[in-house]
Image (cartoon, grey):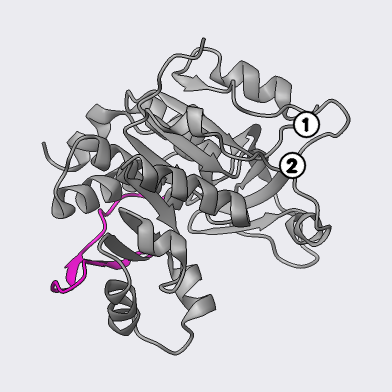
Amino acid sequence: MKTQAESYLFGQILGTHSFLLKDGFLRPDEYSEIEAKYFLPGGETGTAATVLASLGVSVRMDGTWIGTEVAPMLRAFYQDKTVDLSSIHFMDDDPGVMDYVVIAGLVRSPMGRFQTLFSTGKRWWSIPREEDIKDCRAAGIDPFFGDESLLAADICSRYGIPYVTIDSPHDSLLHRKAAVNVVSKECTAEHYAGMDAEEIMKLMQAETDGLTIITQGGGDMLYARKGGEIRRMKPFQVEVKSTLGAGDTYKAGCVYGLLKGMSDDELVRFASACSGVAISRFPLPLNPPRLEEVKQLMGE
């Protein structure tokens, strides 16, 4: 019998090969020295699960099917953590989904075969199950898996479970039903080219009763609800070691904020502090933010 988890996460779970370079980012026809390299859990959901467990939250996660090369690492990594893998589908005939990320300080470049995978028309992720979701207290749902992502949102809505999503446009069902939608600079550049952040926020506000947060890297975060004023908050200033996982950690911080009943101001500040701690170290999965570190950065 499965134990009940406080949170449920659905989305991208990968094996990430990360390479931290020693003397700046790759340059054509020039040699680059690798300072450190790792093969660890990644993806928006995998990273968020790692962070939530570090913050003391129990997690059940599901999403990407896990293959033969990723499975041993994933199982070993989470065996002593409060992350339940029992809902995940493990394949025995495929190496699994992996990505490769080259990192140098503020700059990173991910590589993979996601365009090829999505273009096959085949589903390589799970179908969310009501029994996995209905008794949790907060959820995180990645938008990448089409009808299955919408099904997870629908189950959450039916049971009154608040969920956090990421990079969901203003006219999407995921945005409309979300308790929190965290919209990145990459998303606004793709969907709202030529519009400033306040214009985008007004579109977002009009379509949901939830909280919309627009992050802008090192720039101010904007956040607001329908009919309310647009507020701004500066991110915490830290020495950046690697930005890999910053947004996924921010999402985890928002899920934690929902679990703890934080106000909008408190949630945005807490999530920003989580992300600030995360980018100050590498690799993130082996050094996820601890609650005491987040509070220390917040001055508490």
* Left or right: residue 154 compared with residue 111: left
* Most distant residue in the bottom direction: 194
Q: Residue at x 21, y 41 (%)?
A: 297
Q: Secondary structure at mark 1?
A: loop
* Left or right: residue 232 compared with residue 86: left
Q: Is residue 93 above or below residue 110?
A: above
Residue 233 falls in image quadrant: bottom left
Q: Which residue is mark 1?
A: 67
Q: Is residue 42 above or below residue 68?
A: below
**In this orientation, which residue lies closer to the viewer: 243 or 13?**
13
* Left or right: residue 54 compared with residue 47: left
Q: Say whether residue 279 is visible.
A: yes
Please give the range of residues in magenta.
216-240
In percent of width and height, residue 44 lies at: 53, 46
Quadrant holding the C terminus: top left
Which callout, 2 or 1, points at the residue further toward the start of the chain?
Answer: 1
In percent of width and height, residue 34 lies at: 67, 43
* Most distant residue in the front direction: 158
Q: Secondary structure at mark 2?
A: loop
